[in-house]
Image (tube, coloured by chain):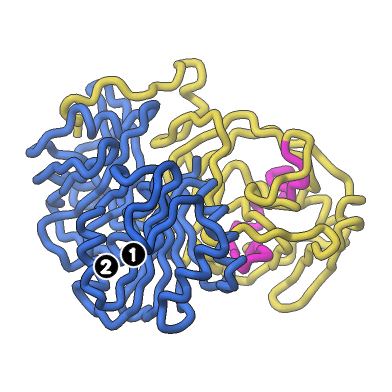
Amino acid sequence: MSAEPSPQSPWQAATITRIEKRTPRVTSFWFQPSRPFAHLAGQHVDIRLTAPDGYQARRSYSIASAPEAGGGIELAIERLDDGEVSPFFHDVAAVGDEIELRGPLGGHFIWEESDGGPILLVGGGSGVVPLMAMVRHRTLRNKAVPVALVFSARIWDEVIFRDELIGLDDRLDGFNLVLTLTREAARRPSDYSRRIDARMMAQAVERLPKAPKLAYVCGSNAFVSAAADALIGAGVPAEIIRTERYGV
Amino acid sequence: MVTRGFFSGRRPPSDTDARIPPGQYLEQGFPVLSAGPTPRVRTEDWSFTLKQGPKPIKKWNWAEFNALPQSKMTRDIHCVTAWTKFNTPWQGVMIDDILADAGIEPPTTFTLAHSFDGYSTNVPTKDLVTGKAMVALLYEGKPITADHGGPARLLVPHLYFWKSAKWVNGLQFTERDEPGFWELRGYHMYGDPWREQRYSSDP
């Protein structure tokens, strides 16, 4: 059984202020925390749902919004059909609901402006979410940091943040978007339609003005394993690669 | 705080309830988590070193280590990312037997486990001895796969599973309780799942 959140509790109530469908399976939820909240790009929060009988379910979700964005914390939540928390968000949660949240959490899979660049980001599916926070942070804070984002999705309509990412790519300000679709043909000349491999990673590195200082890989376990191996195959040193796995 | 509209959830069967620590859910699979790429450590390159501070006490190669007395442990394991898995069967060398082969008693109160990829994690020495922990070599009777920490991983099943360092290559006895990789990055110094010691701000 949980106590009501107290000033000492690391848990706080956050109000859902906005809901926006991103793709058929991913919806963004914005949360306004009740207490001051300062995160770093790449961090996550824990969410805890409590049933009337006291049963609790807890899951971690990466933050998509930049630290300086304002307007609350954006979590982009993918519906997992056999999940117990994500179906609640997709089917039940509404603007105005209060949800218990803890964070920000995580001290490894983060990028700050002071970490420098270039940075190479590799995301699979909703693994793009913490990378999106880094892309947005870089765009708001320091566009001099070169970034390449390789984003693997099954189909064009499952490319989360697609319009925003293509808009950033079109600015030609040092942010490079590489989309690869695993179940559809590529739509843009610079994109791919295959699974990530070492040759694709080598070509992504070539889009940067010099070798990456840091590489971040996020997605399912199978995706992260394959992408990390592809990066190493492309000559990216293992020591600069940080990974975040959903674990399944 | 009751969440509006949350009734269902994936409640565990009541007969297993007592085995699931607070905030955890029962997982049938075996999820994989790590901070970086999976190192592929060949057994011919493998070694395990016992140290006190900077001073090596004893070092074993793969064949020597596998010749030590082996034991089996079947335990429930609890990951800080909230999954619990029941009855995971491991085989390996108890820390007690490693110390016996080195001919020493635990020299200090604290231990840092080290791994081939530079990972480290701290565990009080008393949580490693008296049958509580091993260096595991087999899972379900087979060599541990690289993504689960093979060739060898530490197994400290009564603490959150980040303490069970993958790709382990040594134990270092330390005078002070020195934080390891995740402990420097906001995770708890001890990590007892039954007291829900996930993050450094937890009591």
The x, y position of residue A169, in whole percent, is: 26, 67
Q: Which residues are magenta?
A: B111-139
Q: Neighbour class for label 2 at 10 Å: few (<14), some, many (≥20)?
A: some
In this image, B27 relative to A233: left or right? Answer: left
Q: What is the three-letter code of the residue carrying label 1?
A: Leu
In this view, A201 is above or below B85: below
For residue A24, say whether it is visible: yes
Q: Residue A19 appears at what percent x and percent y?
A: 14, 42
Tell me the subunit letter for badge 2.
Answer: A
- Horizontal side of residue B123 vs A104, given as left or right: right
Q: Looking at the image, which residue is at 66% across and 60% down?
A: B39
Instruction: Tell me the quadrant of the picture where the N terminus of chain A can be found.
Output: top left
Three-letter amino acid code at the position of disc 2 = Asp
- Which residue is the site of mark 2? A169
Q: Which residue is mark 1?
A: A177
Q: Which chain is yellow?
A: B
In this view, the residue in front, B192 or B67, is: B67
Position of A188 with respect to A28 (left or right) is right
Which chain is in blue here?
Answer: A
Seen in the image, is A75 located left or right of residue B148? left
Residue found 23% across the figure and 41% down from its top: A27
The one nearer the camera, A169 or B199, is A169
Residue A46 appears in the rendering: no
Q: Earlier in the sequence, mark 1 or mark 2?
A: 2
* Residue at 80% over, 62% down: B46
